[in-house]
Image (cartoon, rainbow, N blue to C red):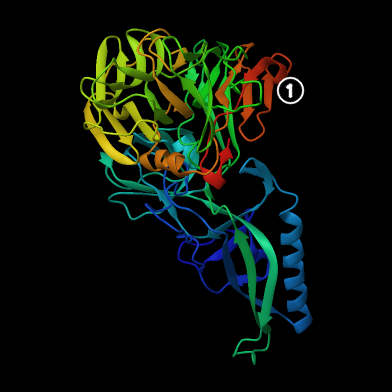
């Protein structure tokens, strides 16, 4: 199929099929780039084509305005009927997307010919060479072959022939500009909108119907209760991971759910995919038992708690005495980044009396830990990152609060968000920014954290003396909008351990595939030249990021 020229009139695509091939021409651009929201904090943009986590979506209707041309009236009607039948059938026999914990058959709509440029980082080009080298780029996650590419100082519109890695692409023609580095560029990438056909359409005769060929206006109705932009199906690869190495799925978890495929190529013992979270909520089943997440060994938390109490979201766990805690062991982290959200009800006064109150600690040992606590002497909520005795602390202003009144804390830190020498950290209390810092990067954890302790410091000190309603921790730096969405959502968190692990050994030449939508694992066995189901050798759960009714998993 011929590519639509850059300056040609736009056309519609549904599930990658151009409606122009069916005799349907677009006559107007629908307002798909700014879906209506009740509240908006930012545009739809972000890693891997995310939607705005700060917006609240009503059901959204849109219509595609088209022209249908034919050799006769019957020809036009047949084309319209064929299109509607194809749409109706297609949306019920396509890959399902997980929306609000339900599999939803949906269509992927895009405007062909419209460019969504990827511009992150800079490039180096060499005159007469087809190879382009990137700096701070993530090309393997965003770009595909056949996409258009343009570089600073060169008016030529190149076509990408191959994407070799995050930092190397091959063009279909040699570079004609002078050799240079640190250049800006634009590379075409695509996003599609998830929609469903609402069964409504209308046709009308245009004012210029005196042409020889029949021409009719066509309007096709669609709805979306989840107006998410999603990126193309991609394959992520990590060559020759070392034994037990963490494979960080950058640029995946923020997009509304779309299929992705993680590929690990051996040799490696027990490659692990660790991309998101551990979280819990309390529930009360009449026997005073909490509903627990499982650790990586499929074991529940150790419990030393005294009871439960009703809260706004349901039930909360009471941490009232010394030693009261929940402890999850054999968990995972990546040693580079961390985010958290917690909802609690303090049972202590803010007046400086008594000892410090640790809400939770995520630790390996005293020199490698993340901790959120209330400093009684300073009367401040505190978020501390300790790596090899290098301590970075974010604190609130002096806080006054009433006992037994809900407080929500959230924050994040990344040791490598900007580069290897600086970090970005933030701390919010009840939606108010208390501390946001950029500074010298704290030392990364010398080893990955394993124990999550809720309600005390190291399970035996500085007891929380709070009622904890919900807690979630992520080993990736979430944005402010993502964290705010956690605060404003109407649904409970899920009890989840978001870690996936392959427990067998990858031999040289073997390829392991993980489908992020289904969680199905397949192994290509190089010695047998065959691809086989590998589910028995994998365990854990695919991580999720969620918010309100727009919850998704991947």
Q: Toward which corner of the image does residue 314 lie, by quadrant?
A: top right
Which is nearer the eye, 467 or 252?
A: 467
Marks counted in the figure total: 1
Q: Residue at x 45, y 15 (%)?
A: 453
Q: Residue 195: give x, y in percent of width and height.
A: 61, 56
> Which quadrant would the N terminus be assigned to in this image?
bottom right
Q: Quadrant of residue 500?
A: top right
Q: Nearer the viewer, residue 442 or 380?
A: 380
Closest to the observer: 332 or 83?
332
Q: Is residue 56 above or below residue 174?
A: below
Q: Is residue 27 above or below residue 163?
A: below
Q: Residue at x 61, y 23 (%)?
A: 291
Q: Is residue 38 left or right of residue 462?
A: right
- Residue 437, x across and y down, in percent: 23, 32
- Towards the viewer: 206 or 303: 303
SS at circle 1: strand
- Residue 422 visible somewhere in the drawing: no
Give residue 173's position: percent from left, percent from top.
44, 46
Which quadrant does the C terminus fall into? top right
Which residue in the structure is indicated by mark 1? Answer: 533
Confirm whether residue 348 shows in the render. Answer: yes
Position of residue 56 measured from the top left corner of the image (x, y, whole percent): 48, 53
- Drawn side of residue 353 relative to residue 101, left or right: left
**Residue at horizontal 26 percent and vertical 36 percent from the top:** 434
Mark 1, other Cα within 10 Å: few <14 / some 14–19 / many ≥20: few
């Amino acid at each position: 199929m011929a590519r639509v020229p850059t300056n040609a009139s736009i056309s519609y695509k549904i599930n990658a099929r151009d409606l122009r091939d069916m005799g349907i021409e677009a006559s107007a651009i629908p307002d798909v780039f700014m879906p209506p929201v009740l509240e908006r904090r930012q545009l739809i943009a972000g890693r891997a084509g995310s939607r705005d986590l700060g917006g609240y979506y009503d059901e959204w209707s849109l219509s595609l305005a088209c022209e249908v041309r034919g050799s006769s009236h019957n020809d036009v009607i047949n084309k319209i009927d064929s299109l509607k039948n194809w749409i109706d059938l297609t949306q019920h026999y396509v890959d399902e997307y997980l929306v609000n914990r339900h599999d939803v058959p949906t269509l992927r709509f895009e405007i062909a010919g419209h460019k969504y440029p990827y511009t992150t980082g800079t490039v180096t080009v060499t005159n007469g060479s087809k190879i382009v080298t990137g700096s701070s780029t993530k090309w393997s996650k965003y770009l595909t072959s056949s996409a258009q590419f343009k570089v600073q100082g060169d008016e030529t519109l190149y076509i990408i022939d191959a994407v070799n890695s995050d930092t190397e692409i091959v063009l279909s023609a040699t570079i004609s500009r002078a050799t240079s580095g640190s250049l800006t560029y634009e590379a075409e990438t695509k996003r599609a909108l998830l929609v469903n056909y609402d069964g409504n359409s209308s046709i009308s005769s245009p004012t210029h119907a005196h042409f020889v060929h029949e021409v009719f206006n066509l309007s096709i109705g669609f709805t979306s209760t989840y107006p998410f932009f999603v990126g193309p199906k991609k394959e992520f690869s990590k060559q020759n991971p070392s034994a037990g190495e963490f494979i960080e799925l950058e640029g995946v978890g923020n997009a509304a759910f779309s299929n992705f495929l993680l590929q690990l190529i051996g040799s490696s013992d027990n490659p692990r995919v660790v991309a998101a979270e551990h979280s819990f909520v309390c529930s009360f089943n009449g026997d005073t038992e909490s509903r627990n997440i499982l650790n990586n060994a499929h074991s529940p938390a150790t419990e030393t708690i005294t009871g439960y109490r009703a809260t706004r979201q349901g039930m909360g766990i009471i941490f009232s005495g010394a030693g009261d805690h929940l402890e999850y062991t054999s968990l995972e982290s990546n040693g580079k980044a961390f985010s958290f959200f917690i909802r609690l009800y303090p049972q202590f006064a803010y007046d400086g009396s008594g000892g410090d109150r640790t809400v939770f600690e995520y630790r390996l040992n005293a020199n490698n830990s993340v901790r959120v606590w209330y400093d009684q002497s300073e009367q401040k909520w505190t978020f501390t990152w300790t790596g090899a005795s290098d301590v970075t602390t974010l604190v609130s202003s002096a806080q006054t609060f009433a006992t037994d009144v809900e407080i929500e804390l959230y924050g994040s830190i990344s040791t490598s968000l900007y580069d290897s020498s600086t970090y970005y950290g933030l701390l919010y209390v009840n939606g108010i920014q208390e501390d946001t810092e950029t500074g010298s990067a704290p030392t990364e954890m010398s080893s990955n954290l394993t124990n999550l302790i809720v309600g005390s410091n190291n399970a035996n000190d500085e007891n929380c003396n709070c009622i904890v309603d919900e807690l979630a921790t992520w080993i990736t730096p979430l944005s402010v909008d993502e964290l705010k969405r956690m605060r404003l959502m109407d649904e409970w968190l899920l009890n989840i351990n978001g870690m996936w692990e392959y427990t067998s050994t990858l031999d040289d030449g073997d390829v392991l595939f993980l489908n992020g939508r289904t969680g199905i694992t397949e192994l290509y066995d190089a010695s047998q030249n065959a691809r086989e189901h590998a589910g028995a050798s994998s365990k854990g759960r695919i991580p999720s990021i969620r918010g309100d009714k727009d919850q998704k998993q991947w």
